[in-house]
Image (cartoon, helix red, strand yellow):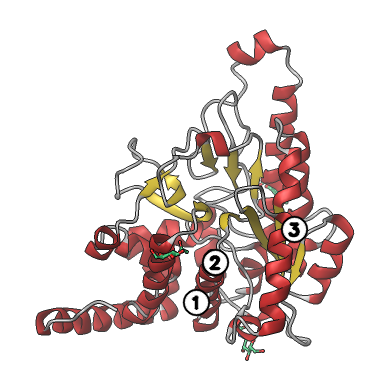
């Protein structure tokens, strides 16, 4: 960790105090925090990459010989020549037929030369049913099943368990980097329409999609979304993931993405020399800020959306829009005014719905993913 001076310590303790108070506000005044902390609007709606799962039992002791070995094998089988893998994760709700994972895989098949990327996709299954379904629909599956625990029901949005789980993801991805694999982490509700690799920066260690892109890929004020990022395995990225993970103690009650927003300009990142880039929504869009040109779009994320039904509804329309676009003759593609017909059921006005729903039922949100 960083050397600490008394002043830093005092500041840190103060920040912890602030963070603890804030998290109380967040946990107990859910409806208020949406209004008082504007940046959380998009954390709850958007940035929160949806990762509705529980890693703890599988990863508390990673890498035990068995798990580590199995993971290594799956990664090796799926990796590209340069040791890059594409990673997503699903639970039962997302793995069900006609649910998120089917739309995700379909996007690769109807996308422009994206089908071959499926050879490099590793699906992390977080419960038995998700794993069973994965084996039916995909080649590279990794199971994090732990006896009879219902992941879907356990982790409610912004509760301590939910936060623990989000942080486990960071720790898991750190272990993938540690094993020497580069990865693209993608939420399964990110549709892949074009190969994103040509649009990645060659010299960046960590590049991440944004809910809102302000115009420059170096601007730390961009609003990153943890649901899509490309990370190269090297000492800088491993150190960065360790730092990010350890920051959950510095900022208790925040989730990984909020902490990323806090630490993204931390001097430590300069010290280790990590090169961070923010990806343009022109290529890596989402429902918060759709990619404006279907001739350019690589991926579209169902961020800024609550509830599984709304998400599925809008994702299906998004796939339809794409199919309509690719069926146009080339000349029309370039000139076409075709644009996304989404968001529809996913929209920021669903925040109102979210506010009114929180005390009643967190289950819907949790099943639908948190973005
Ligand atoms: C995750 O699994 C562990 C171990 O089985 C369990 O004790 C814990 O309560 C679960 N946590 C969450 C976030 O579901
Ligand atoms: C980190 O640096 C050391 C020494 O420079 C090197 O041997 C090692 O391979 C690097 N690790 C990674 C993950 O790049
Ligand atoms: C989508 O929104 C429409 C209009 O508000 C509503 O009738 C429909 O039930 C919604 N569909 C889903 C799947 O949420």
Q: Residue furthest left?
A: 7
Is there any visible trace of residue 34 in the rendered image? Answer: no
Query: Rounded to the nearest whole Å, what is the CA distance between mark 3 and mark 1?
Result: 31 Å
Q: Residue at x 67, y 38 (%)?
A: 318
Is 62 or 282 nearer to us in this picture? 62
Q: Residue at x 54, y 43 (%)?
A: 286
Q: Look at the numbered disc 3 and give the secondary structure of its residue.
A: helix
Is there any visible trace of residue 202 in the rendered image? Answer: yes
Mark 1 vs mark 2, foreground winner is 2
- Quadrant in the picture for the C terminus: bottom right
Residue at image mark 2: 173
| Disc 2 crowd, CA 10 A, few/some/many (<14, 14-19, 20+) | some
Q: Residue at x 82, y 53 (%)?
A: 98
Mark 3 vs mark 2, foreground winner is 3
| Disc 3 crowd, CA 10 A, few/some/many (<14, 14-19, 20+) | some
Instruction: Work out whether mark 3 precedes mark 2 in sequence or the reverse, and give the earlier one.
Output: 3
Query: Rounded to the nearest whole Å, what is the CA distance between mark 3 and mark 2?
Result: 17 Å
Q: Quadrant of ligand 2?
A: bottom left
Q: Is mark 2 within 8 Å of ligand 2?
A: no
From the viewer's perspective, tell me whether residue 89 is left or right of residue 224.
right
Residue at image mark 3: 77
Is 217 or 35 nearer to us in this picture? 217
Relative to 358, is 320 above or below? Answer: above
Instruction: Work out whether mark 1 precedes mark 2 in sequence or the reverse, and give the earlier one.
Output: 1
Position of residue 196 measured from the top left corner of the image (x, y, whole percent): 58, 38
- Quadrant in the picture for the N terminus: bottom left
Residue at image mark 1: 163
Position of residue 6 measured from the top left corner of the image (x, y, whole percent): 11, 85
Q: Look at the numbered disc 2 and give the secondary structure of its residue.
A: helix
From the viewer's perspective, tell me whether residue 125 is left or right of residue 164.
right
Query: Rounded to the nearest whole Å, what is the CA distance between mark 1 and mark 2?
Result: 16 Å
Relative to 35, is 158 above or below? Answer: below
């Amino acid at each position: 960790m960083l050397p600490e001076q008394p002043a830093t310590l005092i500041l840190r303790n103060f920040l912890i105090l602030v963070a603890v108070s804030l998290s109380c506000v967040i946990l107990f005044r859910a409806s208020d925090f949406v209004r008082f902390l504007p940046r959380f609007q998009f954390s709850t709606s958007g940035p929160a990459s949806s990762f509705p799962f529980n890693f703890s039992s599988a990863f508390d002791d990673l890498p035990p010989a068995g798990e580590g070995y199995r993971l290594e094998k799956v990664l090796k089988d799926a990796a590209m020549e340069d040791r890059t893998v594409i990673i997503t994760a699903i639970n039962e709700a997302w793995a069900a037929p006609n649910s998120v994972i089917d739309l995700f895989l379909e996007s690769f098949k109807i996308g422009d030369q994206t089908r071959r990327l499926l050879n490099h996709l590793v699906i992390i299954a977080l419960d038995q049913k998700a794993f069973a379904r994965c084996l039916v629909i995909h080649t590279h599956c990794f199971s994090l099943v732990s006896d009879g625990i219902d992941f879907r029901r356990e982790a409610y949005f912004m509760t301590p368990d939910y936060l623990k789980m989000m942080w486990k993801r960071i720790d898991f991805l750190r272990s993938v980097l540690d094993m020497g694999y580069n990865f693209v982490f993608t939420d399964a509700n990110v549709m892949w329409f074009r190969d994103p690799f040509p649009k990645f920066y060659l010299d960046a260690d960590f590049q991440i999609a944004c809910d809102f892109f302000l115009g420059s890929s170096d601007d730390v004020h961009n609003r990153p979304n943890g649901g899509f990022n490309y990370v190269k395995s090297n000492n800088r990225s491993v150190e960065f993931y360790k730092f990010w993970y350890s920051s959950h103690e510095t900022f208790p009650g925040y989730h990984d993405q909020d902490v990323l927003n806090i630490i993204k300009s931390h001097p430590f990142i300069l010290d280790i020399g990590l090169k961070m880039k923010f990806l343009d929504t022109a290529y890596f869009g989402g429902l918060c800020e759709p990619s404006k040109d279907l001739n350019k779009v690589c991926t579209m994320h169902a961020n800024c959306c609550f509830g599984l039904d709304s998400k599925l509804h809008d994702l299906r329309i998004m796939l339809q829009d794409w199919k309509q676009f690719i069926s146009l003759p080339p000349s029309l593609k370039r000139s076409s005014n075709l644009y996304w017909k989404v968001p529809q059921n996913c929209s920021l006005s669903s925040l109102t719905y979210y506010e009114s729903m929180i005390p009643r039922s967190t289950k819907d949100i949790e099943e639908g993913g948190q973005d």
